[in-house]
Amino acid sequence: MAVSMAELVLVSILMDWALRRIHIPGLVGMLLVGIVFGSYALGWIDNNLLAISSDLRMIAMIVILLRAGLELSKKTMSRVGMRALLLSFIPATFEGAAIAFMGPYFLGLSFMESAILGSVLAAVSPAVVVPLMIRFIEKRMGAEKGIPTLILAASSIDDVFVIVVYSVLIGMYTGSHVSIIWKLAGIPLSIITGIAIGLAAGWVLYKLFQHFNPRATKRVLILLGVAVLLIRVEELTKSWLPFSALLAVMAIGFIILDKREHFAHELSAKLGKIWVLAEIILFTMVGAQVNIGVALKTGLSGAALIALALVFRSIGTWVCLLKSEFNIKERLFIVISYIPKATVQAAIGAAPLAAMKLAGMNTQPGEIILAVAVLSILLTAPIGAWAIALTGDRILQVAEPSVHEALDAAIESEAEDSM
């Protein structure tokens, strides 16, 4: 397993360097490395490593979501909060509804099967979007209008909404006993409880850090440990208390930034170093889940459905931005940022097939749903990541740092030098 990990790290670093030379995000190369090395292609990744890939992806996601929270300032969130709420469900609704109505014509699925496919495809990928937005925040690109912060917050809530809708639809389709009212009520409830628990945990950690003042490295380890435990709490309570652990993880960083900005920047810098390895793990493991053979089964009809659905998603995103302070180019950037798919599709793409097998139903619709989910990753993750990086560098304006931020950056630099 160690040898397999070493191979992935070395080849990914090489791909990252090569693609950045031609202005393509390195994560595209990492995705491709995972696809090529995965068991569905060359099969060079150790099976033991693949067996723990879900845990590795979870830890990597925790690292990037903690960093995201540590960059979410209260001032910016108060300005973009309503837009973020709209972006968290309207684009996904547009895309999911379009797939539900077009699926029968393109893929021969029933309306309900197409709706399930729509719920699988409608989520944007935080694994792709969040790292790119953090890079823009660090460079203060789009900071004046809070554009990266808006996308960070909206894309995280988007996943909660889509997964709950999927669970309702698959329950209805397979005949499982499911309370639709309770499941739909779980969307706002999971968001509220996730944020509330995260804020409470963040406040406790802030107090502990302030009182005992552990080294920054130990603070980071404590943060990671608490975040993993929150993921476990979500699993234990999901049957009776809707709770979004990923939002809780972001809320921890948010409250630390609000209470002690210097702590937050110090922790973010440490997490940034961990992210060098975590990024490789996340994208290679996501890529390793991609079954190219299954993706090709749907052919041009699947690709056409994905493309048309993205048109409807883009319309929904544009609707959310009407009467906003963003100019046309900035709105276009936000639309493009909502294209990539990977995380949710890799996580639940095969779930409908498994549910149909368990219920003793015809599994062909499940195979089609899995194939289109995989195809959506292949088509949108690399292209979307490249398009976000390209348009962001050209469209987003660099904001001048305030005197306070410049001073804080100088203190942070001194602190890093002394470690």
Image (cartoon, rainbow, N blue to C red):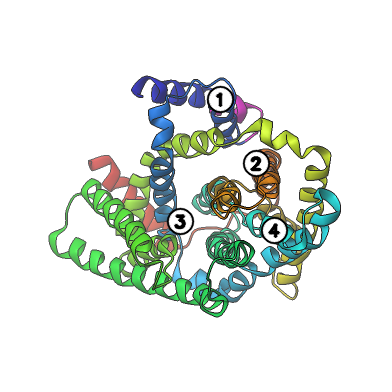
Q: Kindly report the secondary structure that dominates the magenta region of the rendered protein.
A: helix
Residue 126 belongs to magenta span: no
Which numbered disc flags the more N-terminal residue, 3 or 4? 3
In the rendered view of the protein, which quadrant contains the C terminus? top left
Q: Which residue is mark 3?
A: 68
Image quadrant in which you'd find residue 315: bottom right
How many neighbours does mark 3 have within 10 angstroms: few (below 14), some (14-19), or many (20 or more)?
many
Report the Cα–Cα distance between label 3 and label 4. 27 Å
Report the Cα–Cα distance between label 1 and label 3. 25 Å
User: Quick check: 152 left or right of 307?
Assistant: left
Image quadrant in which you'd find residue 79: bottom right
Report the Cα–Cα distance between label 4 and label 1. 33 Å
Q: Secondary structure at mark 2?
A: helix
The outermost residue toward the left is: 212
Q: Secondary structure at mark 1?
A: helix
Is 339 or 355 nearer to us in this picture? 355
Label of residue 118 in the image = 4
Q: Which residue is mark 1?
A: 15
Q: Mark 1 and mark 4 in contact (Cβ < 8 Å)?
A: no
Which numbered disc flags the more N-terminal residue, 2 or 1? 1
Q: Mark 4 and mark 2 in contact (Cβ < 8 Å)?
A: no
How many neighbours does mark 1 have within 10 angstroms: few (below 14), some (14-19), or many (20 or more)?
many
Residue type (three-letter) at the residue carrying disc 1: Met
Q: Nearer the viewer, mark 3 or mark 4?
A: 4
Q: Mark 1 and mark 2 in contact (Cβ < 8 Å)?
A: no
Residue type (three-letter) at the residue carrying disc 2: Val
Report the Cα–Cα distance between label 3 and label 2. 27 Å
User: Quick check: 113 left or right of 61?
Assistant: right
